[in-house]
């Protein structure tokens, strides 16, 4: 009995579909290999049914509907035209060998012609439909892209405008570095360093670093360029055009800028923050020292008073003579010195209470020098007083300033060699309608080590074996309480100069609590 295409498809339906799916998974490319087998089984079953209707019944509707469906599926999944054409061709590769095996020659030739006609129609229709859908999709996609481009261009222009306003108007410095050169800097960056914008661009970034910070910042920059771990936020000292240096904080990152890997950063002046942190630390330290000092002073003072009283009684005993009497006198003197030290400690620990009243500065300085005349003569020191008659009467706590002047004079006496010279000066200044008075104390001693310039005003710091380290600290404390400042510098040849500046233009008529 001749094997018709109808009987053939009924007899070999499952065998053909199964083999068709297998070859799609194995030989039709990676996209087909990645599809779920259940999906392929469904589409191949539909393709087989559509081919059957075309070949046996001459109906093109099923094949056309399948072509429309498979076009949409494969376009959405990103298949190429040739991939699906290959999938259709697999039907022919499977069916013809089976027909050749079981059909008579005449039936085989006729069946092959029908199959070729079916596939020619299917592949041509699919190709045209696929290409048309693809072109429509491209056109639609292009229209969407054009709309997106217009929208994004507008948004980008608005964003660039906002960004430009933001970058130029912020108070922090913003900059971009490429190959060590500054290629962009906003207004704030230029002003922070004292340059015009055209003077900044093209300069090496380390031009704006203080020498003390240069090595560390350059090392951070090199690590960031090499993609090595480096801090994103760090502090350094920036260098301005006039040579001044200021503490600064940088937040930096590595990004692409104008198509090139660049370092961008925001630098912020932290001078006030550093000052505040220093004040907070100093206040905490002083409070702690004050607590310890008060506790120790009270614990020591009572037994020390008892020791001194008993020593004074022994000193009056007529049976104690010669070296023993001298030893008792020395003990009383040293006990008295310890009491003075304890008093200084307690004064230091207590808040500084100022009582303002009219004060004659020149008279106070002259009185201090007169009171220390014996001390000056002990070391054969010459004292020169140059007091400016233009210094006016002003409001201050004369007692506290007198204490500060005594400390400066004692310091000068200790620093001077026998037969040395001390100079005491007062001056009236009026700088930009901000009047102040200046007190200068000079000695011709050994001067101060440069490394100790920032240490000598700290509490309990002393270079003398018998010093408490509170003299200059109290001087600074009292001067600051009067809204003034104190500065020390070495003289050109030998000795040191202490300068006190006291503002006399403000309202100093109230009591003030200072620590």
Image: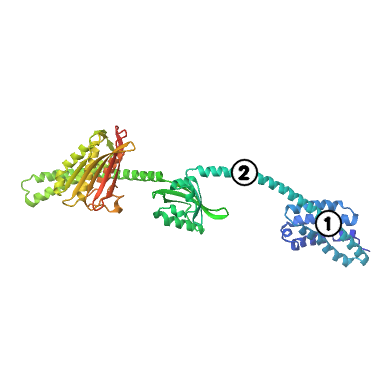
Answer few, some or many: residues within 10 Å of disc 1's Cα (few below 14, many 20 plus, some between 14 and 19).
few
Comparing labels 1 and 2, the label whose residue is closer to the camera: 2
Residue 313, image x and y in percent? 11, 44
> Mark 2, residues whose alpha carbon is within 10 Å: few (<14), some, or many (≥20)?
few
Find numbered disc 1 in the image and state the secondary structure of the residue it sits on.
helix
Q: Is residue 268 left or right of residue 131?
A: left
Identify the residue at horizontal 84%, vertical 52% (top origin). Answer: 64
The residue nearer to you, when weighing 394 against 475, is 394
Q: Earlier in the sequence, mark 1 or mark 2?
A: 1
Q: Nearer the viewer, residue 500 or 110?
A: 500
In this rendered view, identify the residue nearer to me: 118 or 494.
Answer: 494
Tag count: 2
**Which residue is rendered at x = 80% and y = 55% of the image?**
127
Is residue 10 visible in the rendered image? The answer is no
Label at residue 124? 1
Q: Quadrant of residue 159?
A: top right
Whole-number angstrom distance, CA of label 1 to CA of label 2: 45 Å
Question: x%, y% of residue 178?
Answer: 52, 55
Instruction: Please tell me whether residue 51 is drawn above or below residue 296 in the rendered image.
Output: below
Colour basis: rainbow
State the mark number for residue 155: 2
Q: Secondary structure at mark 2?
A: helix
């Amino acid at each position: 009995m001749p094997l018709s295409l109808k009987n053939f498809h009924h007899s070999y339906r499952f065998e053909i579909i199964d083999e068709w799916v297998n070859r799609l998974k194995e030989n039709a490319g990676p996209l087909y290999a990645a599809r779920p087998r259940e999906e392929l089984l469904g589409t191949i079953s539909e393709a087989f049914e559509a081919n059957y209707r075309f070949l046996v019944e001459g109906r093109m509707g099923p094949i056309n509907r399948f072509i429309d469906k498979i076009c949409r599926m494969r376009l959405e999944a990103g298949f190429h035209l040739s991939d699906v054409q290959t999938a259709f061709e697999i039907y022919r590769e499977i069916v013809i060998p089976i027909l050749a095996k079981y059909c008579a020659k005449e039936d085989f030739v006729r069946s092959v012609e029908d199959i070729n006609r079916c596939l020619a129609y299917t592949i041509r229709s699919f190709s045209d439909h696929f290409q048309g859908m693809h072109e429509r999709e491209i056109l639609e996609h292009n229209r969407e892209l054009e709309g997106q481009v217009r929208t994004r261009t507008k948004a980008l222009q608005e964003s660039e405008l906002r960004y430009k306003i933001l970058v130029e108007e912020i108070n922090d410095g913003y900059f971009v570095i490429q190959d060590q050169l500054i290629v962009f800097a906003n207004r704030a960056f230029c002003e922070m360093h004292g340059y015009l914008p055209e003077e900044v661009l093209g300069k090496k970034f380390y031009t704006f670093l203080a020498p003390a910070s240069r090595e560390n910042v350059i090392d951070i920059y090199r690590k960031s360029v090499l993609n090595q771990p480096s801090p994103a936020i760090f502090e350094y000292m920036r260098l301005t055009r006039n040579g001044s240096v200021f503490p600064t904080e940088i937040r930096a990152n590595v990004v692409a800028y104008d198509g090139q890997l660049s370092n961008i950063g925001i630098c912020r002046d932290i001078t006030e923050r550093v000052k505040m942190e220093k004040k907070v630390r100093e206040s905490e330290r002083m409070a702690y020292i004050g607590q310890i000092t008060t506790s120790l002073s009270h614990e020591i003072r009572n037994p020390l008073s008892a020791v001194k009283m008993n020593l004074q009684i022994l000193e009056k005993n007529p049976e104690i003579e010669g070296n023993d009497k001298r030893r008792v006198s020395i003990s009383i003197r040293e006990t008295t010195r310890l009491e003075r030290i304890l008093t200084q400690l307690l004064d230091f620990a207590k808040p500084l209470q100022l009582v303002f009243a009219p004060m004659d500065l020149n008279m106070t300085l002259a009185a201090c020098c007169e009171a220390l005349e014996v001390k000056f003569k002990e070391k054969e020191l010459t004292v020169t007083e140059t007091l400016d008659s233009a210094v006016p009467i002003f409001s201050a706590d004369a007692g506290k300033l007198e204490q500060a002047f005594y400390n400066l004079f004692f310091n000068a006496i200790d620093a001077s060699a026998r037969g040395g010279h001390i100079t005491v000066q007062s001056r009236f200044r009026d700088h930009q309608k901000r009047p102040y008075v200046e007190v200068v104390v000079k000695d011709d001693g050994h001067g101060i080590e440069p490394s100790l310039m920032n240490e000598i005003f700290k509490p309990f710091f002393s270079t003398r074996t018998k010093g408490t380290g509170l003299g200059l600290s109290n001087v600074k404390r009292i001067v600051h309480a009067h809204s003034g400042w104190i500065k020390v510098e070495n003289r050109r040849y030998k000795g040191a100069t202490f300068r006190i500046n006291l503002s006399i233009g403000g309202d100093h008529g109230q009591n003030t609590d200072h620590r």
